[in-house]
Amino acid sequence: MSKPELAPEVEHFYAQVVDESVRLSTSADGRLELLRTQEILRRFLPPAPARVLDVGGGAGIHAEWLVKDGYDVKLVDPVARHVERAAKICMSELGDARHLAEADSSYDVVQVLGPLYHLPAADDRQAALSEARRVAKPGGLVVAAAINRYASIFEHVTYAHLHTERMQASIGTILRTAIHDGKRGFTLAYFHRAEELAEEMVAAGMVDVQVFGVEGPAWSALKAVEQQAGGAPSEDLFASVLTAARMAEPYPELLAASSHLLAVGRAPGASDTGV
Ligand SMILES: C[S@@+](CC[C@H](N)C(=O)[O-])C[C@H]1O[C@@H](n2cnc3c(N)ncnc32)[C@H](O)[C@@H]1O
C-alpha cells in the first residue's frame, strides 16, 4: 500500500532515535509496562486462536507474546523499520490507524497501543478509534493505550531536573495544553486524562469501556533508582511497585499517577444494538 502520512518528527523519532524492539526490555519501567499490559489484556482476550490486529504495533513486542499465546496476529505500523522487524514475528504491513485497509468486522481483537500518543488532533484520534471499531467483529475487544497527561511530572523528577527553568516551562506546557511539540526530547505527542480516553472510546462507538493504569502510581520510584543510583532496582522494589499498580486498580483517583493508561472496550454486538 502507499506510504502513510506520518508527522515528520514522529517518523524521524521511530526510524532513527529510539529502538522500539528493546524499549520494553531495557528499563525497569519498560518491563513493568510490558508485564502489566500483558496481565490486563489477558483478562479480556478471547481464547486463542483468535484474530488480532495490532495497530501501531511497532517492532512487534506485543505481537510476539500474542503469537506465542496462540493468536493469529497482523501488525500495521507507518514506520518501515518497525514493519520489517515485525515481519519476523507475524504478518505485518505499512498502514495508518486513521484509515485501515482491513475489511469491516474482521478481527476478534483490535489493539491500538501507541498511535493515540502521536495524534494531537482530536479528529485524528477519533478516526483511529472509529477505524478500530469498524474492523472489530461485533462484540470484539478494542483496546487503546494513551500516555497520561501527568506522566511528565513524575518522569522528569526521576531525571532530577524538573526544578530547572527550562524543564518547568516545557512540562508546564504539556500540563496546560496536553501536547508536546516534539522540538526537543520526546517527539510530537498527546497526553490524555483517563476520563478523556474513556470519552473518546465511547464517542467512537465502544461499549463496556474501562480504563486501567498500566504502571500504577509508583512506577517513577523504579526509574528514579535507574536514573539517580545508576543501577537496576532490586527485585523487591519491582515487586512492590507492581503490587501498587494492582492495588490501585479499584481507585480511579490513582489513574492520574500512572505513566500509561489502557482503555478496554468492545465493539457493539447484537445485544448492544438490540438487533
Ligand atoms: C510507543 S510506540 C508503541 C509500539 C507498541 N504498540 C508498544 O506498545 O510497544 C508507538 C507506535 O505508534 C506508531 N504510530 C504513530 N502514529 C501512528 C499512526 N498514525 N497510525 C498507526 N501507528 C502509528 C509508531 O510508529 C509506533 O510504532
Image (cartoon, helix red, strand yellow):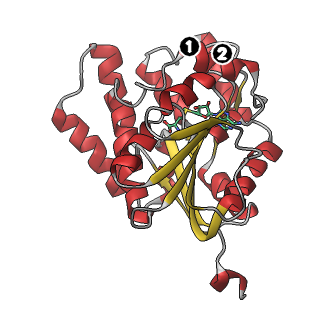
* Residue at screen point 22% across, 35% down: 237
47 or 223, which lies in front?
47
At label 1, the amino acid type is Val
* Residue at screen point 49% across, 14% down: 161
Check the image and report above or below for 96 versus 228: below
- How crowded pointer 2 is (Cα within 10 Å; few <14, some 14-19, many 20+) is rated as some
Measured in 3D between alpha carbons, the distance from the residue under mark 2 to the one under mark 1, in whole angstroms, is 7 Å
* Residue occupied by mark 1: 17
At label 2, the amino acid type is His
Percent x, y of residue 205: 72, 66
Q: For residue 34, which quarter of the picture? A: top left
Q: Quadrant of ligand 1?
A: top right
* Residue at screen point 56% across, 13% down: 17
Quadrant location of the C terminus in the rendered image: bottom right
Quadrant location of the N terminus in the rendered image: top right
Is the Cβ of the residue at disc 2 closer than 8 Å to that at disc 1? yes
- The secondary structure type at the circle numbered 1 is helix
Residue 12: assigned label: 2
- How crowded pointer 1 is (Cα within 10 Å; few <14, some 14-19, many 20+) is rated as few
Check the image and report above or below for 274 versus 109: below
